[in-house]
Image (tube, helix red, strand yellow):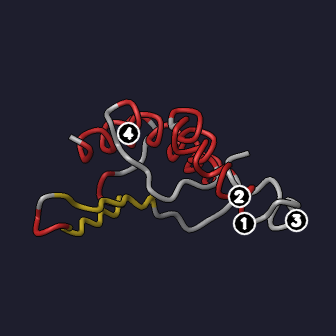
Amino acid sequence: MFVATISEVADAHGYSQEEIGFYIQPLENGRACHFETTFYYHDTGERAATIHNLYADAARAMLQRGALFTRPYGLLADLVYPRATAYTTALRKMKQILDPENILSPGKLCF
């Protein structure tokens, strides 16, 4: 399902499916897996902007289909943390305990 979703979004952005990198690593004796997708490109400017939009749309589509992002940062943080209120609350508590003066990377953790 996730491969089909990525392929659909790539097609919508005119990105060749032959250039998509997929990585799947089985976990927990095959009961789960870690899945990554890479959109390769070689230049900057217009192509980089196209890939950024592709990445954003792919992330949104994956979230809508139940994907779990375990290390959200950048764009993913903005998409994931508002949906994971219990997780975000726990992170805030840990941040307060470990950094009560908020001097370690302020603004870098989902808030």
Name the mark nearer the viewer: 4 or 3: 3
Tell me the residue that label 4 is attached to.
62
**Pick the front one: 74 or 85:** 85
Callout 3 amino acid:
Ile
Callout 2 amino acid:
Lys
Callout 4 amino acid:
Met
Tell me the residue that label 2 is attached to.
95
For label 4, count other residues whose C-alpha is less than 10 Å away and answer few (under 14), some (14-19) or many (20+). Answer: some
Q: Mark 4 vs mark 2: which is more N-terminal? A: 4
For label 1, count other residues whose C-alpha is less than 10 Å away and answer few (under 14), some (14-19) or many (20+). Answer: few
Q: Mark 4 vs mark 3: which is more N-terminal? A: 4
Callout 1 amino acid:
Leu
Percent x, y of residue 1? 20, 40
Q: Say the numbered circle drawn on residue 103.
A: 3
Q: CA distance from mark 2 to mark 3?
A: 10 Å
Q: CA distance from mark 4 to mark 1?
A: 33 Å
